[in-house]
Every structure is written in structure tokens, then in C-alpha cells.
Amino acid sequence: MGYPHLFSPGRIGNIHIKNRIIMAAMGTGLAGFNGEITANSLKYYEERARAGVGLIITEMATVDNELGKVNYIQLSVANDKYIPMLNRLAQYVQKYDCKIFIQLGHAGRLTTPQFLDGKQPVAPSPVGWGTQIPRELSLQEIKGLVNKFARGALRCQKAGIDGIEIHAAHGYLINQFLSPKTNLRTDNYGGSFKNRMRFLDEIIHAIRDNCGHDFPVIVRLSADEFIPGGIDLPMSQKIAQHLEGIGVDAIDVSNGLNVIETAAFDQGWKSYLAKGIKGVINIPVISVNVIRKPDFAEKLLQTESTDFIALARPLLADPEWVKKAREGREKEIQKCISCRYCIDQLNNGLHIACALNPRTGRELEFNDPKKSGEGKKVVVIGGGPAGMEAARGLAQRGFSPILFEKSDVLGGQLHLAKKGVNKDRVGWLIDFQTHEMQRLNIDIRLNHAATLEAVQKEQPYAVFIATGSSPVKPRVEGIDSPHVYLAEDILEDRASFKNRKILVVGAGMTGCETAEKIALQGNQVILAEMKDAIAEDVEKVTRNEKITNLKKFGVKILTQHKIGAVYQHKVTLYDLKTQTELLLKIDAVVIAIGVKPRDELVEIFRKAFPIVMIIGDVKKPGDISTALRGGFEKAYTLE
């Protein structure tokens, strides 16, 4: 076996776990509106269990429907009515020799007003979160919440769930009691370390009183909150030792206030936190470490940095990550690229989804595809992400796809996308899709333009058009001057500058990445955008990270500015707010205002073939998620 540590059995409390891989808790938005397990939830968790995960820890289930919710759609254990479907969940998962724990928690001050029907959120102290100020919990309310946690755990036990995890991390209510930053109480629940631990202590003791000492209880901690005056590693080591002393069965090490890393973070960057906790306790340590590859997970176990590997986003990108690792099929693993698309979906009130895996959260909708292709030929035009995903899906359904790509390489715009700062993981997607083409023996025709005659010669059953998009140039004076470039010229290193003053026009993701790259080469950069904000097409945290980097590199940002005309050593910008013209001295202009579909083949092929599918940017310019989703769905639904 290639990963002896990863696939060795483990134990938490009296529960035996078949390997060292745990599915970490992560919100899904798949529960019912009232907090019950649904058919979508069952299918989502079942797929990960079937593929070999040793233990699943569900998303946080609230113990308090009135004040404790994080999201509109969230699991709940706040009433006996949830027991039957929790039991169904246990049965769905356990039949694969996979254990399941329910994570119990309360949002505290991190709930949002629309969940509260006009009520004020609660917390240990009235320490604000954004514009929201919570009220301080009374002693009676604290006792009531202790009971709610205990009753929730008992419901899980009655349902046949294997154990529970108490969520004491990421800034939620218990974390708020533990942290000196948010707990300013002067009674028995605040001040000293012992008093700040009291709420969690009472919860654990109450669970033991209700469920016995053989029912596993683990605790998730933020080992470092990364905020001044908050919990740091030495303090969390002390917390972990205390929890071991009162009988907790394992510590699940996380960090920060609900941190889901961007692509700027390397695999294992925070492994020192888990290692620091493991060094002071004897009970098992579970840790999330931005792990993407099985060999890296194996290394962490081998070096005794942790006892169990927790995977969250990797199991969204590829539910069969564990199975493929066990069978030595690492090249077939669709590796998470840390794009945060999944979090963006949840933050927008939608269910969990993955940019790379269109089935995530839709496992029930897209169950096993019908093998109805019967060898029929389908021509796919374009070897970018949409075209390759379509070819892959068609082959899996028994069609015989033929992929025409006019260039000498597969990947399309992904090759441009991976050129940005901290975007090298996009190359993983290219490698995965290219390997899938080889594995499925798809007929790939590089350096072949898909003319009507060439495609007609194949007599295809259907044609998929995925010809992508082309950059757009504004129609202004001087735009075709030799010192005017496209963003792709910079990202592909066809042009570079040193000690020059460069104007980048357009501040979407591509424009920001282009400006960042030019600034890093040692140039003075001005970034102009017509809208009143930059990077609006980027997920919020990644956007903030990008803006911070641009400012750090000295990029001057001009919003609500439109390019006017380009001259030899200057350019005019029009200030849309003041309706005045600005004259800038510059050495070069780089255009990044967007793309337009390459749709010249669409009507020609629609007239020639009865079934023509339009996917990717040629249908509507988008991102990786829209490209892959379009390719997948059209391949799945082809009749």
C-alpha cells in the first residue's frame, strides 16, 4: 500500500475508525428549511462514505433554533422530531463501515439579524461583530444552553450517531466564551482561564451525564485566532490539556475566525498548530491543513504532526479522493484549487457547490448517468475546460466523443488563468482533465480546426461547440497603437516592462492579476475601472486579498474612470463621477475589459446538424465553474 499511515486504523474513544481520513465539518445548505436531514443531505454524505472516508463529521447542527442559527438552511438537533432522519443518516453512512459524528454548536454573536425575527443576538459579552451588538447572556440562559447541548447530544445518541463534536472554534458561541477578546464577563463565566472554560466544561459534563462515558465527545478548537488579545497557540495548548483532563476523546485543531484559505496558502501552512497541540496531550489530534494530495497527508502522519487528516473542500472537488488514493490512482484525483467558490455559494444563501465538480450538492439530481451512448459519435469543438468536461461526460455515458482543438495543447483559457499570482493550482485542473482524456481513450485531434467539412465527414450524432471567447478592445482613438497590449500578452509573457509607467484598463480578476504582475516586475501601475469598485467578479475574501496586494505593490486604483484616447506617451481618462477629463503620462496601455464569445461557428453548425449544444464562453463568458457545469450538464442530458 502506497500510504501505510493514511490507511492504518485509528481510534477515538471506544470507536474504531478504519483509516486516518476524516471528512471535516462544512456547511452545506442541504438540510430542510426547519433543520431536518433531507434526501439531498443523505446522498451527499453517502457518496463520501461509500468512497472510503473513515469518519464523517457533519456540518454544524444548531442546538437552538431561536437564537443559535448561522444560516437559513442549517441542520438542527433542537427537538426530538429530528431523531428519525438523523437515524436515516447514520444508517446511510454506517453501512460502508464509516463512522459519523454530528457537530453541535451555537452561532452566538455570529448569527445574522434576519434569522432572529427582530431579537438581539446573544454572546458572553456585548462585544460587537460588524454593526451588530449582541446582548450578554444571563446566568439562567447559560444554564439553559448547557442543557440544550446535552439534549442535542442525547438525540444524536438515540438516533444511532457514533459520537459528537462540540464546535468551540471559528468565533461561534463557545469560542466567544473561551477567548479573552470576546469574554469580558466578571462573574463565574469570565475573567480567569478557569472561568472562561466553565461554559464548555459544563456542556461536556452534562453530555456525559446524559449519554454516558462511552459516547465519544470531541472538541474543535481554533488553536490561534490570529487576532490581538485572542486565543493563541500557548493558550490553546492549555485548553487542550484541560479538556483531556475532563475526559474529551480528541481535539480537532482548526484556526482563525471561520478561516477558509484562498489559493495564496500552501498545503500544510498551519500544521505547526496541530503539532503544537499534539505535543502536549495524549488523546488523538485531528487537523485541517489545506491538504490536497495524498502524499502530503501521509507525510504529516509520518512526521507525527497529527493523528487524523481532516479533509473538507478536497471531498467536494472529488468525493472519491480516498478511494483513488487507496488504489494508487492519484492522477485521477480532482484536486481542490482553493478558489472559495463553495464558500461564496453558501454566503449567497445557496447550497454547497464546487467550481470543479458540478455534482457537488446535486448528487441526488445527477445520480448514476444513463449508459445510453451506444458508441454514437459526438464531435466536441474546443479543448478548453468546457469542451474537455463535455467529452469526459460523454465518454462515461458510452458515447464516442471526438475532440477538435485548433491549437497544439489542451486547456484553452486555463493556461492564461494559471499565469496570475498564486494561480498555479489551476494547472492541476489542466493536468486532471488531460489525464481523463487519455484514461477514457477519447479521440483528441490537436492542431485541427473544426471546419464544417471536417465535422460532416465524421457524421456525428451531435455537435458540442466550446470555442471559447476573445478579448475585447474599447473603440477609442489610438487603441491599435503598438504600445497598447492585451492582458494575455502580459500574463503569457509575450510582453514585459521594467521601470515604466503602465495603465491597465479594466479591473476584473484578469485586470487585477495583470496589474499585480506588472507591478511585481518593478513598474508604476495605474489600474482604471469604469465601475465604482474593482474585482466585483471575485469572491469576497479573495477580492479583499487581491486589493490588499495591489495596494502593497503600489498600484494606483482609479474607479469610475473610462479610457478616452491613446497617444504616443499619454492617455486620456474620463472621470465618470466628476465628468472631467484626466490626462496621464504613460509608457504603455494594457487592456483587460473583458471577452466576447467566439460564436461564428454556431449558426453554421446549427443549420448543418440536428443536435448542437453550446457550452462555455461561447454561450456566455464566465468562469471555471460555469464552463465545467455547462459541459457536464449538456453531456449528462444528451438523449
Image (cartoon, rainbow, N blue to C red):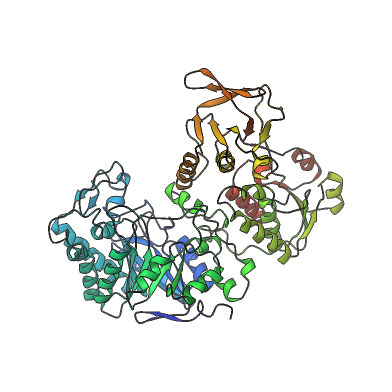
Residue 402 coordinates in the image, percent (x, y)? 78, 56
- Is residue 622 in view from this perspective? yes
Q: How many marks?
A: 0
Quadrant (top left/top right/bottom left/bottom right) for the N terminus: bottom right
Vertical comparison of 63 with 327: above or below: above
Quadrant (top left/top right/bottom left/bottom right) for the C terminus: bottom right
Looking at the image, the residue that sits furthest to the front is 499
- Is residue 619 in view from this perspective? no
Residue 484 coordinates in the image, percent (x, y)? 67, 31
Looking at the image, the residue that sits furthest to the left is 187
Query: Which of these two is toward me, 517 or 447?
Result: 517
Query: Which of these two is toward me, 9 or 71?
Result: 9
Vertical comparison of 598 with 303: above or below: above
Q: Quadrant of residue 259?
A: bottom left
545 vs 439, left or right, is left
323 vs 383, left or right, is left
Query: Which of these two is toward me, 195 or 116?
Result: 195
Residue 171 coordinates in the image, percent (x, y)? 31, 55
Residue 414 coordinates in the image, percent (x, y)? 65, 50
560 vs 139, left or right, is right
Q: Which residue is rendered at x = 74% and y = 40% of the image?
A: 602
